[in-house]
Image (spheres, helix red, strand yellow):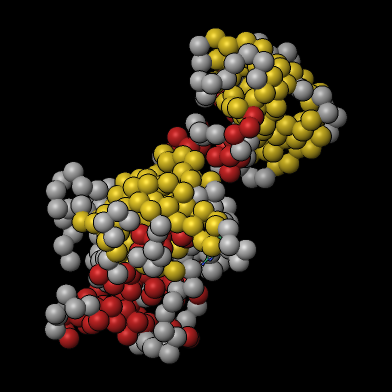
């Protein structure tokens, strides 16, 4: 297959203003995706992340050609695949993309070898000899670590082995784009972890662009070079894992990724990009992420448990909260503290073992740069 973009400036995938609705029985329409645009560059690993029903699968299936959108456009390396305006709709088998499904979608009563050789034999473009195909299939099965199982029937394999065969089937054609629909959710935690690491190194080695659907935020952080967080069919944020984690675009993203303390309150002062918020547990000063916020507005002051530090003497930081330890749990690499501050629980994670007794009086300190102030109605 032709892996090179037609022109250097063309991304591997361009999605423009894509929309797709499903009709309900009562005649109304559910907008599954609603005006989504993004590019995927060569070697990108884009994760589509969001809760059940936010439109991830519909978006992925539209890119594959398995779903016909109502509006917008999709192109691969500058070549139109779908366009509502020009009524272009290239069928899935001619888009030159491979897909890995949650359910593996293998033929259980065929061998691993047959499952993987099939896409090469069935592609019209691939006029390869039998021996060329066989060596390519073996090479790919070896690559994903199941070379020795090539003559085994898929029905007799473990979930992890089956998913490796499914991965080999997707990689064997050497397409520039591989789509993944929650491929690791049916394998156990240890195997999943291992497959993630292997998938990333395979992707770097082979250089394909990946679009990967998951509802697991930890998986998204591990795999994604960029993460697209979907909120009811729209893009809430598309950025690197670091940016999504440290600068979530709104409360929805902040609540979905990792853990956040969230203290609702009213803005009492604004200085540049810094806002002071009177919350139910005291005054918190933090970084304002929206221009539209004014003094008197309802906002959420949000901060991560690992941004808090604990002392038993009065600290000098701008943000300090006086509270009482409710629970203190050593969980290995850190200790999780639950502190009652004016009747509300706040969570603080401190590195290592630092177990305190329930009832201990403490100060919790959070530096201003670690507090994000966001409009309260953003979810
Ligand atoms: P999940 O993780 O549960 O698969 P998702 O984020 O992938 O969720 P989609 O499967 O894309 O979400 O669904 C988006 C919306 O479109 C949902 O409201 C869903 O009920 C609706 N939907 C999806 N497929 C269909 C269909 N074939 N017919 C009707 N409605 C559909």
| Image quarter (top left, top right, bottom left or bottom right) of the N terminus | bottom left
Single out the residue that lies furthest toward the bottom. 109
Question: Can residue 56 be seen by looking at this rendering?
Answer: no
| Image quarter (top left, top right, bottom left or bottom right) of the C terminus | top right
Quadrant of the rendered structure where residue 377 is? top right
Quadrant location of ligand 1?
bottom right
Quadrant of the rendered structure where residue 129 is? bottom left
Query: In the rendered view, would you say 197 is above or below 108?
Result: above
- Horizontal placement of 321 versus 186: left or right? right
Q: Residue at x 51, y 34 (%)?
A: 248
In terms of depth relative to the viewer, which is nearer, 93 or 119? Answer: 93
Q: Where is residue 259 shown, x and y percent of the image?
A: 62, 40
Q: Residue at x 50, y 20 (%)?
A: 291
Query: In the rendered view, would you say 312 is above or below 67?
Result: above
Q: Where is residue 111 shown, x and y percent of the image?
A: 37, 87
Q: Residue at x 16, y 62 (%)?
A: 2
Quadrant of the rendered structure where residue 303 is? top right
Question: Can residue 272 be seen by looking at this rendering?
Answer: yes
- Horizontal placement of 334 versus 176: left or right? right
In terms of depth relative to the viewer, which is nearer, 207 or 194? Answer: 207
Q: Where is residue 152 shown, x and y percent of the image?
A: 39, 87
Q: Where is residue 19 shown, x and y percent of the image?
A: 42, 52
Q: How many marks?
A: 0
- Horizontal placement of 372 versus 203: left or right? right
Single out the residue that lies furthest toward the right. 359
Single out the residue that lies furthest toward the front. 27
In terms of depth relative to the viewer, which is nearer, 81 or 148? Answer: 81
In terms of depth relative to the viewer, which is nearer, 91 or 147? Answer: 91
Q: Residue at x 74, y 18 (%)?
A: 282
């Amino acid at each position: 297959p032709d892996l090179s973009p037609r022109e250097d400036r063309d991304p591997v995938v361009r999605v423009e203003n894509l929309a797709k609705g499903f009709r309900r029985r009562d005649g109304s329409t559910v907008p599954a995706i609603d005006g989504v645009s993004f590019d995927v560059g060569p070697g990108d690993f884009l994760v589509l992340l969001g809760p059940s029903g936010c439109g991830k699968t519909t978006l992925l299936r539209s890119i594959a050609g398995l779903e016909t959108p109502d509006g917008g456009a999709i192109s691969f390396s500058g070549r139109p695949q779908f366009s509502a305006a020009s009524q272009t709709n290239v069928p899935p088998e001619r888009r030159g993309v491979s897909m890995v499904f949650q359910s593996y979608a293998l033929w259980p009563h065929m061998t691993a070898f047959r499952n993987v050789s099939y896409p090469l034999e069935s592609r019209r473009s691939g006029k390869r000899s039998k021996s060329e195909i066989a060596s390519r299939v073996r090479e790919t099965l070896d690559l994903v670590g199941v070379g020795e199982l090539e003559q085994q029937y898929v029905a007799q394999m473990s979930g992890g082995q089956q998913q490796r065969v499914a991965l080999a089937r997707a990689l064997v054609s050497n397409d520039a784009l591989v789509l993944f629909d929650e491929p690791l959710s049916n394998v156990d935690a240890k195997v999943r972890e291992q497959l993630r690491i292997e998938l990333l190194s395979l992707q770097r080695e082979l250089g394909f662009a990946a679009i990967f659907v998951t509802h697991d935020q930890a998986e998204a952080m591990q795999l994604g070079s960029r993460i697209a967080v979907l909120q009811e069919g729209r893009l809430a944020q598309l950025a690197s894992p670091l940016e999504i984690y440290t600068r979530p675009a709104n409360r929805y993203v902040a609540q979905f990724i990792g853990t956040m303390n969230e203290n609702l309150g009213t803005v009492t002062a604004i200085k540049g990009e810094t806002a002071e918020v009177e919350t139910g547990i005291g005054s918190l000063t933090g970084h304002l992420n929206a221009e539209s916020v004014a003094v008197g507005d309802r906002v959420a002051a949000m901060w991560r448990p690992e941004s808090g530090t604990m002392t038993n003497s009065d600290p000098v930081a701008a943000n300090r909260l006086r509270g009482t330890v409710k629970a203190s749990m050593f969980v290995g690499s850190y200790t999780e503290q639950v502190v009652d501050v004016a009747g509300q629980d706040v969570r603080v994670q401190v590195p290592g073992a630092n177990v305190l007794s329930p009832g201990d009086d403490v100060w919790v300190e959070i530096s201003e740069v670690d507090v994000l102030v966001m409009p309260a109605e953003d979810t």
